[in-house]
Amino acid sequence: MAIYWNTNSTTRIRPEVSRVIQRYIDSNNFNVFQNPSDYSDESKALFLSVISQTRARFLRFIKANTNDFAIFTSSGSESNNIALATGEKFIGRDGTIIISALEHDSINLRCAYLKELGYNVEVIKVDKLGRYNYEQLENLQCNGRVFISMMLVNNELGNIYDLKRIAEIAHKKWDKVLIHTDAVQALGKLPIDVQSLGVDMLSVSGHKIGCPKGIGALYVKNGIDIQPLIYGHQECGYRGGTENVPYIAGFEKALEITQFQMTEDYATILKDYRDKLQDGILEICKKLNHTAYINGDMDNRVNNTASITINGIDNVRLILMACNIGKTIGQENMYFSNGSACNSALCSASANTDNPVKPSPVLKSICHPNYREVIRISVGDELYNYGRSDLDYDTCDKSQIFADIKARMRLNLKSGLAAFEALLKKYNN
């Protein structure tokens, strides 16, 4: 058994999704074995149907126009980089790229490189709660064309950002502007309406909603001149490489289930669990003489995420202890993080080494006094392994599933908080 509070990093592959994918990797089925670019008539109809149906479902899910497009990629990071390459082409050498101080490394690192090449890159700052400085954007003076890439939901704090306001400011200030948003952490956590947001491109990743790693998508508004990263004829010439039909099919199923869950009832269940969990952790910290508090904008964040500062701890040591606590005191192993996965990966080495851990750009941006004292919990129904159910959306009524999720959350809350208290006590000793 394990207690998993790290769904912003990745999610368990849903059983419903696994069954769909299995149909397209069946080695005994000649039609699904063939290359989608070199198929028989029967296979052609199958592959085109899968790809077009998934594309249509994704566009409906984000409320796009029917003449808009979506490119299937390998990840959210690839989608972000295609968007950036398109932005670079759009602005040329005389324009400006605008990002926020909180962007994912797939945006940050590329923009740092572009700055070295002489591109003009402006960074919108945030306050101590991680909220965008919209006034800075309003006062920004830019020549030529403008490309904006600012995320919709922050992966560490859970903050939700007003992309509609950003688009309105941008179109009022500049004649020629292109807007992209990284919505990887927004998918499945809040409704997305690209027309209302006013964005031209939007990135998502399948493994945040129950797909395997290896499938992402980029929404593209009709008329946008896409700059490919990988040249080839696939995806209408926008993204070369043999189509990953099994994962594309799985992505459609994951979107279908996610749509079922986009209800007020489910949102209430998840928020109630997150709130009780974070409050329980704060109470345990107080009991064990650690000052603790929540980071970020508590009034405007997604329902599954909490970033918690616990004074007096080293998060690397605590995380490593949590992953192995079952070997020492018989408690369930626990999984949470110290921020985004791209930074947490460097924590795999022993905490006793002198290897530096990469500071969180997000915590640095909000002027957090000590990033080594922060943990992130992120929760979701499919990874409550304590009392995990075999119920799924293919065979059960939605109300039955929601009742089961609620019951398992109660079990997980009790066992999880007990395990966290045991962990912190062991840490203190």
Image (cartoon, rainbow, N blue to C red):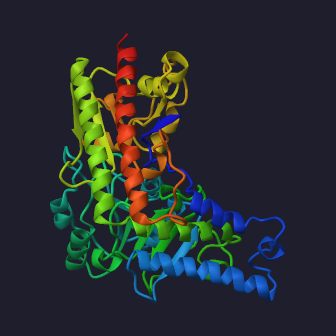
Q: Residue at x 34, y 70 (%)?
A: 192
Is residue 206 depicted above or below 427 in this figure?
A: below
387 left or right of 426 in image: right
Residue 364, picture quadrant: top left
| Residue 51 position in % (x across, y down) | 61, 78
Residue 340 spot, x, y in % from top left? 42, 44
Q: Is residue 235 above or below residue 274?
A: below
User: Residue 384, position in %: x, y?
Assistant: 45, 44
Picture coordinates of residue 205, whole percent (x, y):
50, 61
Comparing 233 with 87, the one in front is 233
Viewer-proximal residue among 206 and 103: 206
Q: Could you tell me if residue 162 is visible in this image?
A: yes
Q: Residue 363, relative to residue 148: is it above or below?
A: above
Task: Left or right? Give the position of 187 relative to 130.
Answer: right
Pick the residue in front: 272 or 393: 393
Task: Name the quadrant containing residue 194.
Answer: bottom left
The number of discs equals 0
| Residue 364 falls left or right of residue 297 | right
Q: Is residue 302 visible?
A: no
Residue drawn at 49 percent across, 82 percent down: 69
Nearer to us in this view, 214 or 11: 11
Identify the residue at horizontal 44%, vertical 35% (top origin). Answer: 358
